[in-house]
Image (cartoon, rainbow, N blue to C red):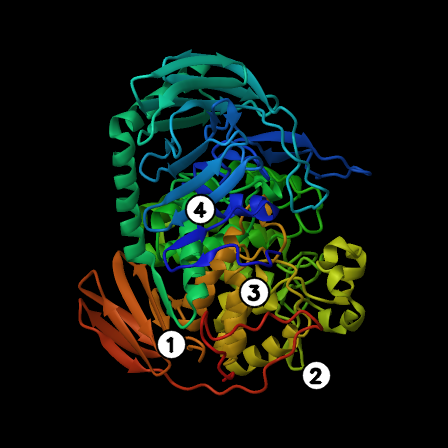
Amino acid sequence: MITHPAYRVEPWCLRETELNLDVLSQSESVFALSNGHVGWRGNLDEGEPHGLPGTYLNGVYEFRPLPYAEAGYGYPESGQTVINVTNGKLIRLLVDDEPFDLRYGKLHKHERVLDFRTGLLHRTAEWTSPSGRSVRVKSTRLVSFSQRAVAAIAYEVEPLDGDVRIVVQSELVANEQLPHSGGDPRAAAVLETPLVSEQHAAHGPRIRLLHRTHHSGLRLGVSAAHVVDGGEKTEMTSESSDDLARFTITSRLCSGQRLRVEKFVAHGWSAMRSMPAVHDQVDAALAGAVSTGWQGLADEQRSYLDGFWARADVEVDGDAEIQQAARFALFHVLQAGARGEARALPAKGLTGPGYDGHCFWDTETFVLPLLTYTAPQAVEQALRWRYNTLPAAHERARQLGLKGAAFPWRTINGDECSGYWPAGTAAFHINADIADAVVRYIRATCDETFEREVGLPLLVETARLWRSLGHHDHHGDFHIDGVTGPDEYSAISDDNVYTNLMAQHNLREAAALAEHHPDLAAALGVDDEETAAWRDAATRMAVPYNDELQVHEQSEGFTRHQVWDFAHTGDEQYPLMLNFPYFDLYRKQVVKQADLVLAMCLRGDAFTAEEKARNFTYYEQLTVRDSSLSACGQAVMAAEVGHTRLAYDYLGEAAMMDLSDLEGNTRDGIHIASLAGTWFALVVGFGGLREDDGLIGFTPRLPEQLGRLAFTVQFRQQRLRVEITDKKATYTLLDGDTLRIRHCGECLTLSADVPETRQVPVITAGRSPEQPAGRGPARRGRAVGHAEEPAR
């Protein structure tokens, strides 16, 4: 956990004003740049010191064995691990033969600024070498949203105390040595030298490396070009070998002179193309970047982000830290998915190797809702990737003796690579999570082409899975037994409520869409009998309820289990999964992350207001939040049932997950789903955003600690701005002719640029629920620079 103020609180940037080696790896994650295709960790330009070097290409991985003490039928035979590909960030500097290394000499100033509006990472350092020569180094880097294969750096060196000889070595390096993970299951496996050299070249200011992976058979290339502006006494050479290509600049600088190097780096990979084809691919991307030039790339980046912020910005009055965190979150979620283009969205994005670079259900449940209303083109591409992996999902279902498609719990290429089946294979709710994202995207965009080509097949094949996985009992009720829900401290349960309700939604929507497209459905083998079976299963879906406690059970029999001994569990024993056997966790009432509470967020129509309040109170006392996915869902439900102060505290936890390193593993990459959860808590929680059968609605509930919340969403190609205070909500249609919405159940028809204002009703709630001993969220003050106000 970061316990000192590492970053300044500013509304539109993240600023680090000193280099702290104790949190270097965390800073490398939060300062990472990506576009969903290329990811550059925020390593220092000179490469050392570093916490964890990292350059990633979405979809590039290596196989690794999954050893089992006892093999079993259906166990995945190999895993997939994201690899650190060729590093093009490196620019080493020597000042009169002294390496620019901030661990030596004297560092007078060091500042890094990640600008959310421009997408640029700026760095300034003033340093005196051990031999007494002082220089100022400035660098700015970007990973382009407009040219997805391209990243670039502008690098300047200026002497501060007279003439100095400067040597700059701009490099491409493959197979960098990486630190070991330390045994944390959330970290990545370290693969030694995963890349095999196929070609290297150096021609003047252009250098190139081509490699392939040992086992997965992927071919990748990285090429760089340089534009140099130096004095008359500037010389340049280049060289290359299997894992290193280097462009060297030597210059004699006088006082007032600067050496400026603009470095353009192009990346490419393929599972099928030949070496010449990948060679040409990266060289073509590089030619486009050089033609555009540094300033052109920067201008394109700003233009792209101007469009995004016009659709997506969230304004928070009353808590400057949350305001910064909200924009930090939006920026990083955009970086994770903007140019993924039919590739997965990993749990850590492309900011680090955590979770081996795998994609989970996090994407569909937490990330895609945000992108649906702010950057829908990214959602279409993410779901198209799921569609492209249908053959693997069909094969996995067949292997498990099921019909339809069984999507993987964790994967990079579409194959299941979870070696622990109770938490992996049994977590079938991933199917319904994908279906839910499909339905939300279709309703929000009216994308008919997607609906026909991608949406219908995904809904049909996921519905088939549920019908074959579940069964009707002798009363006719439909049960789904032996599954694992979102709470990973419970496994192999019968009738997990989250799973059943999401499957119910999946079955209903599949039947409706199949009937809407009868010819296309028939081509998929769907007939009236099958859709009737889906509807019948949905209608008779079992939803366990404890009449004595008057709460829904997380799964059948859950409330009968012994309650975990929270009073005798110390702070140092969390997360529980690292300190207790799963066997002990599975048979106790202890919840890792919001499960039934998340079901109430996503399937609120299945619960009454009274049931939501009782359920929320009951499960609060059991939920320990050993997952970064929990706080945002708890924030949404706390707001809905009236505990706005508690919701505000949970918002703070979700928002500060990486900026304060609350989980202690930001070093391995930021938590994309928790960042998306910041938007989820603000817009879905306090804004009350809900979509009901094609109509978007809001039930605002603002905590007293916030003076105003404003946000923009895109719905059916129209932009809607919502502004909320404690007493009123104002809705303004920014783009489009008319839009029907709901405010607290009242239907409104908005006309362009004509604001509609309505009162926000006051909600009263009972006593705030309790959490397990020592596991309540940190209580937030009113705001940075303001005293705390009393809770509502």
Q: Residues within 10 Å of mark 3 (few under 14, many from 20)?
A: many
Q: Which residue is mark 1?
A: 707
What's the amino acid at mark 3?
Answer: Ala
> Does dot 3 land on a helix, a strand or a loop?
helix
Q: Residues within 10 Å of mark 4 (few under 14, many from 20)?
A: some
Q: Nearer the viewer, residue 760 or 554?
A: 760
CB atoms of marks 3 and 4 within 8 Å: no
First of labels 4, 1 by sequence position: 4
Q: Could you give the CA–CA distance between mark 3 and mark 1, rounded to whole angstroms?
A: 22 Å
First of labels 3, 2 by sequence position: 2
Q: Residues within 10 Å of mark 1 (few under 14, many from 20)?
A: some
Q: Nearer the viewer, residue 86 or 510?
A: 86
> Does dot 2 land on a helix, a strand or a loop?
loop
CB atoms of marks 3 and 2 within 8 Å: no
CB atoms of marks 2 and 1 within 8 Å: no
**Residue lying at 49% horizontally and 35% vertically, measured from the top left:** 128
Q: Which residue is mark 3?
A: 631
First of labels 3, 1 by sequence position: 3
CB atoms of marks 4 and 2 within 8 Å: no
Q: Nearer the viewer, residue 288 or 524?
A: 288
What's the amino acid at mark 2?
Answer: Glu
Q: Could you give the CA–CA distance between mark 3 and mark 4, rounded to whole angstroms?
A: 32 Å
Q: Could you give the CA–CA distance between mark 3 and mark 2, rounded to whole angstroms?
A: 28 Å
Q: Which residue is mark 4?
A: 111
Image location (x, y in percent) of residue 635? 52, 70
